[in-house]
Image: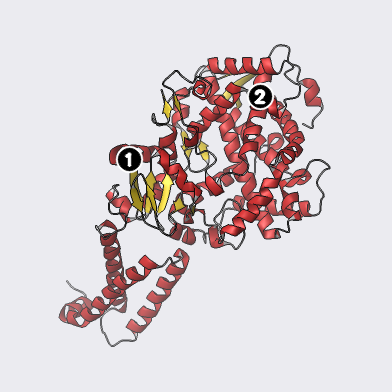
């Protein structure tokens, strides 16, 4: 049995053919335009919805007797089928500028596959396996290459951030982390930030760092005493410490987070991490981010933004403590607009707290997974600082070989970041291969950081001795330049030196004061397998430890000197 409009369509199908042909030609024409111009995803969606509505209106007003809806759908289908076929055909054709570079076929067609593997948290391992199969230069999206060679580090000196760093909703603000419209704006803002991280600026942060280190130790002891099994979630406590300290560093005396004291019932850390995950994964398909950003944010995300705004307003009314300037004092003095201040504060707290805390947590995990390293580091610290609660001068911490080696070796495994850049006009040559302008390229950081070409022997094994003088023997390879933890070039992390200082200081405080151990049933390999990275790091398993004050270590006086 056929419907009336179906028989009419069969009888008068020739009447529709010219329109279907026109729709197909329009689809191919759209590909020509979109191949030469970048269009925001939300704008494109609105255009197509409006166009479909207008088309349907005119079809309804026509003299065709069969279903207007069917005609509209037929024309739209013809348009998108032509657009899709032209796009796929070109991206897989030998005429595409990246046709010579191998990679999974479907990945060459759409960036959605890169977004998908990014969401798994195991992108770095998937890309590593693909590099082993396809070679050092791998096509992982229509216009994106992953490059697994040591020489690729040099490309970061001259290339700008890709659209993956574009601010969500394309808000007209200038921030350090996101892609700015003009590089001059980034340089000017970075110059302001850099003032905080000069030697004198860092010294002004030390009283807060000292106080928060003692707070962390109080937090560990209190939470462990309240735990029925006598264990404490170390990674959670360190995350709370880092968030509290970053609040001090950004807002000074206006910081109201106090997560070590109160926990995180409002979910600030989880919400911040989820936002970073979305930016890192969906951001690989910028057109999709343009669309999804219009979906209403969660109540927690709105609270996170409003909390930052409230503290910023309070900070604008308050002067910093004498001798303890915060980041906002430098930005305010430079005349940075309030909306920029709010976004800078939010980004600084999320980015600054996240990477530092996870590196510290994983440093302790690796040390406790191999207790001999914990004991060796403890011995090094004992020798340098006979008084475990006394001052820890910055210069003396910098000079401790094993402490620095332990941090660097952790960074080698904990920072498999995906750092995409855009090839400038004129193109680039990497490993003798020409890469066209406007191509997105990214160093395969994990592959480089765990490659025998850069770190030998045992590149997949935690062995901090490789960073010491003499390394692991006469054949040792330790390519420090391959460590991508803080990026490279003009967009390298401005707070790199202070981040090291934070980690040295707090790790030293903890290891001098405590004997730590993993519980006997702790799954060491399972924990490592559950470390996920999407520009932020998520742990599938909790890092439970037991902390015990070392004999003769009196912390009570130090605890009494700081607020609980």
Q: Which of the colour schemes (rainbow, by chain, secondary structure, one colour) is used?
A: secondary structure
Instruction: Please state the horizontal and vertical placement of residue 109, each as a whole percent of the image.
Output: 31, 55
Instruction: Please state the horizontal and vertical placement of residue 470, each as a whole percent of the image.
Output: 50, 19
Circle 2 residue: 508
Reply above or below: 386 against 310. Answer: above
Point out which mark residue 490 bears.
none
**Secondary structure type for disc 1:** helix
Of pointers 1 and 2, the one earlier in the residue sequence: 1
Q: Residue at x 66, y 57 (%)?
A: 340
Circle 1 residue: 130
Q: Quadrant of the N terminus?
A: bottom left
Q: Residue at x 44, y 24 (%)?
A: 461
Instruction: Please state the horizontal and vertical placement of residue 249, each as a whole percent of the image.
Output: 71, 42
Residue located farthest toward the top when viewing the structure as drawn: 551
**Secondary structure type for disc 2:** helix
Q: Residue at x 50, y 31 (%)?
A: 541
Reply above or below: 108 against 74. Answer: above
Decide which of 266, 463 is in the foreground and name it: 463
């Amino acid at each position: 049995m056929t419907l009336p409009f179906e028989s009419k369509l069969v009888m008068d199908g020739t009447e529709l053919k010219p329109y279907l042909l026109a729709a197909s030609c329009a689809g191919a024409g759209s590909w020509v335009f979109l191949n030469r111009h970048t269009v925001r995803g939300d704008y494109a969606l609105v255009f197509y919805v409006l166009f479909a509505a207008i088309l349907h209106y005119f079809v309804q007003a026509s003299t065709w007797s069969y279903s207007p809806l069917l005609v509209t759908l037929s024309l739209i289908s013809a348009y998108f089928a032509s657009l899709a076929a032209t796009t796929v055909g070109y991206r897989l054709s030998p005429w595409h500028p990246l046709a010579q570079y191998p990679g999974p076929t479907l990945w060459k067609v759409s960036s959605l596959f890169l977004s998908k593997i990014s969401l798994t948290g195991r992108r770095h391992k998937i890309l590593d396996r693909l590099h082993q199969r396809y070679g050092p230069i791998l096509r992982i999206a229509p216009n994106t290459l992953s490059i697994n060679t040591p020489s690729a580090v040099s490309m970061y000196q001259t290339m700008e951030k890709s659209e993956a760093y574009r601010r969500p909703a394309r808000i007209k603000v200038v921030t350090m982390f996101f892609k700015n419209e003009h590089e001059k704006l980034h340089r000017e803002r970075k110059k302001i930030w850099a003032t905080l991280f000069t030697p004198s600026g860092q010294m002004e942060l030390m009283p807060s760092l000292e106080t928060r280190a003692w707070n962390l130790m109080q937090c560990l002891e209190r939470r462990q005493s309240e735990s029925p099994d006598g264990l404490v979630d170390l990674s959670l406590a360190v995350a709370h410490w880092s968030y509290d300290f970053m609040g001090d560093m950004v807002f000074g005396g206006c910081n109201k987070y106090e997560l070590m004291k109160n926990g995180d019932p409002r979910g600030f850390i989880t919400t911040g991490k989820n936002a970073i995950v979305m930016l890192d994964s969906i951001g690989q398909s910028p057109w999709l981010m343009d669309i999804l950003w219009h979906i209403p944010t969660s109540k927690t995300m709105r609270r996170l933004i409003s909390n930052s705004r409230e503290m910023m307003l309070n900070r604008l009314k308050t002067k910093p403590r004498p001798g303890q300037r915060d980041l906002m004092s430098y930005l305010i003095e430079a005349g940075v607009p309030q909306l920029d201040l709010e976004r800078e504060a939010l980004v600084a707290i999320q980015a600054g707290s996240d990477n530092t805390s996870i590196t510290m947590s994983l440093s302790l995990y690796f040390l406790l997974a191999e207790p001999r390293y914990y004991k060796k580091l403890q011995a090094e610290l004992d020798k340098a600082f006979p008084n475990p609660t006394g001052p820890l001068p910055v210069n003396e911490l910098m000079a401790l070989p094993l402490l620095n080696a332990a941090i660097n070796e952790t960074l080698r495994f904990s920072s498999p970041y995906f750092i995409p850049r855009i090839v400038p006009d004129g193109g680039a040559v990497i490993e003798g291969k020409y890469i066209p302008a406007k191509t997105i390229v990214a160093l395969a950081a994990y592959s480089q950081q765990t490659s025998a070409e850069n770190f030998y022997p045992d590149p997949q094994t935690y062995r901090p001795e490789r960073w010491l003088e003499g390394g692991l023997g006469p054949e040792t390879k330790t390519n420090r330049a391959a460590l991508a933890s803080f990026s490279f070039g003009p967009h390298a992390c401005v707070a790199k030196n202070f981040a090291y200082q934070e980690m040295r200081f707090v790790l030293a405080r903890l290891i001098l004061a405590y004997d730590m151990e993993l519980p006997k049933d702790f799954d060491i390999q399972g924990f490592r397998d559950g470390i996920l990275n999407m520009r932020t790091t998520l742990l599938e398993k909790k890092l439970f430890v037991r902390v015990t004050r070392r004999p003769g270590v009196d912390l009570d006086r130090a605890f009494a000197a700081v607020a609980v």
